Image (cartoon, rainbow, N blue to C red):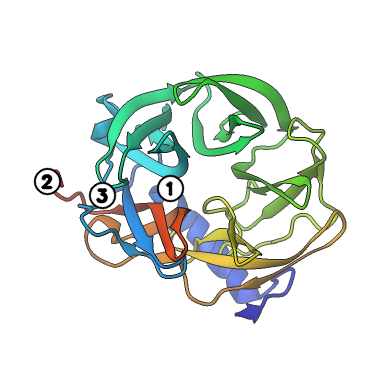
């Protein structure tokens, strides 16, 4: 691992950032079309999140847009896992690639390989919801999704997994993307991308419902689309905390990096980058063009199951 500076100002990266923003990001992002390539969801396993490989027995992708059960949905991405009553549950963005319209869909599985879609479980027209950060606290399940409105909202499952109700507005006033909420050290934290691809903001709160305050070091990443935008919930491995970030240069979401958070207090923040990406586009097949989200769940002492997303060529699927 190498220590990264708190802020990256290299002029070359700035030029690459603006080139990517104009040439690749909008066209490739989930909900923005993308030619004949599609976003879908796959299953991976490994001894750790740093050693992930396609899961044995999985015919990736294990979920595609058509599984949602609505003809207009052709784009799915940003999967978040929950494990309840012996089943895996996954919540994910489900959209029409041309209009961007859709909501948050749900699927469940006993083994992580064979999935049954339960359709869209949360939508808020005229807003579009995405990136459903789902987590558990105090015995309840909560969700903080991205929205096209200028507010990040907290939802609680009144009947898990298919009924969700608004609880509170957490952060207002600016369009923020990929909100990633987690509890650490007795406080609540939120990593969230800025309106520009190269920004990463950090918020914190004493209680989940707030009030939420922006950290004095925020934005903790400035003008660096290689490492800014969140790519799934943070990981805790051997008592170390890692944030995940998607690399959006030279193309949107091409791989996911991990950063060990070495300092996280009300007044300070520091991190180190893990050199090897957790996942990356392969150049062929269902994940040829991009892989930009990981949610990993420990299933044993040295075994992990992960749900990932990817953009690539549609492939014929057979049931495992």
Q: Using the rendered image of the protein, determine whether residue 80 is visible from the camera's viewpoint.
A: yes
Q: Report if the CB atoms under discs 3 and 1 are less than 8 Å apart.
A: no
Q: To which quarter of the image does residue 305 belong? A: bottom left
Classify 10 Å Cα crowding around label 3: few (below 14), some (14-19), many (20 and above): many
Q: How far is disc 1 from disc 2 in space, using C-alphas? A: 27 Å
The N terminus, quarter of image: bottom right
Mark drawn on residue 61? 3
Seen from the viewer's position, the closer of residues 47 and 20 is: 47
Query: How many C-alpha atoms fall within 10 Å of the one at disc 2: few (<14), some, or many (≥20)?
Result: few
Q: Of circles 3 and 1, which is in front?
A: 3
Residue found 59% across the figure and 55% down from its top? 234
As measured in the structure, the alpha-carbon distance from the residue carrying label 3 to the one carrying label 1 is 18 Å
At 23% across and 48% down in the image, what residue appears? 36
Q: Secondary structure at mark 3?
A: loop
Q: Nearer the viewer, residue 147 or 166?
A: 166
Sequence-first tag of 1 and 2:
1
Tell me which corner region of the image, top left, top right, bottom left or bottom right, holds residue 153: top right
Q: Establish if 193 lies above or below 107.
A: below
| The quadrant where residue 103 appears | top left
Q: Which residue is mark 2?
A: 318
Location of residue 101 in the rendering, given as x and y in whole percent from the top left corner: 41, 27
Q: Give the number of the disc on residue 29.
A: 1
Give the alpha-carbon distance from disc 2 to disc 3, as whole Å: 10 Å
> In what element is the residue under mark 2?
loop
Q: Is residue 212 above or below residue 233?
A: above
From the top left corner, tell me how far across and down residue 173 is, in percent. 74, 33
Tell me if I can see residue 97 in this picture. no
Q: Is residue 49 left or right of residue 43?
A: right
Taking depth in this image into account, of 97 and 103 the one nearest to the observer is: 103
Q: Residue at x 51, y 56 (%)?
A: 21
Disc tally is 3
């Amino acid at each position: 691992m190498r220590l990264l500076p708190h802020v990256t100002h290299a002029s070359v990266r700035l030029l690459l950032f603006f080139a990517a923003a104009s040439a690749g990001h909008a066209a490739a992002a989930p909900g923005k079309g993308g030619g004949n390539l599609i976003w879908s969801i796959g299953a991976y396993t490994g001894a750790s999140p740093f050693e992930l490989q396609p899961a044995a027995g999985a015919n990736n992708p294990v979920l595609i847009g058509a599984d949602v059960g609505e003809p207009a949905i052709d784009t799915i991405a940003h999967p978040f896992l929950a494990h309840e009553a012996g089943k895996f549950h996954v919540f994910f963005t489900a959209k029409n690639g041309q209009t961007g319209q859709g909501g948050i869909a749900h699927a469940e599985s006993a083994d992580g390989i064979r999935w049954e879609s339960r359709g869209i479980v949360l939508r808020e027209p005229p807003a579009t919801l995405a990136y459903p950060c789902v987590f558990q606290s105090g015995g309840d399940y909560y969700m903080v999704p991205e929205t096209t409105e200028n507010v990040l909202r907290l939802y609680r499952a009144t009947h898990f997994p298919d009924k969700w109700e608004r609880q509170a507005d957490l952060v207002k006033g600016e369009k923020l993307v990929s909100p990633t909420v987690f509890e650490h050290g007795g406080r609540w934290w939120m990593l969230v991308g800025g309106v520009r691809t190269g920004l990463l903001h950090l918020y914190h709160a004493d209680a989940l419902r707030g009030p939420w305050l922006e950290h004095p070091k925020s934005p903790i990443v400035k003008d660096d689309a290689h490492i800014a935008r969140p790519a799934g919930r943070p990981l805790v491995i051997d008592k170390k905390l890692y944030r995940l970030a998607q690399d959006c240069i030279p193309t949107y979401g091409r791989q996911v990096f991990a950063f060990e958070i070495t300092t996280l207090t009300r007044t300070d923040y520091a991190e180190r980058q893990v050199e090897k990406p957790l996942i990356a586009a392969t150049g062929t097949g269902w994940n040829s063009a991009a892989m930009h989200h990981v949610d990993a769940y420990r299933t044993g002492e040295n075994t992990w199951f992960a749900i990932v997303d990817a953009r690539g060529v549609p492939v014929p699927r057979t049931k495992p």
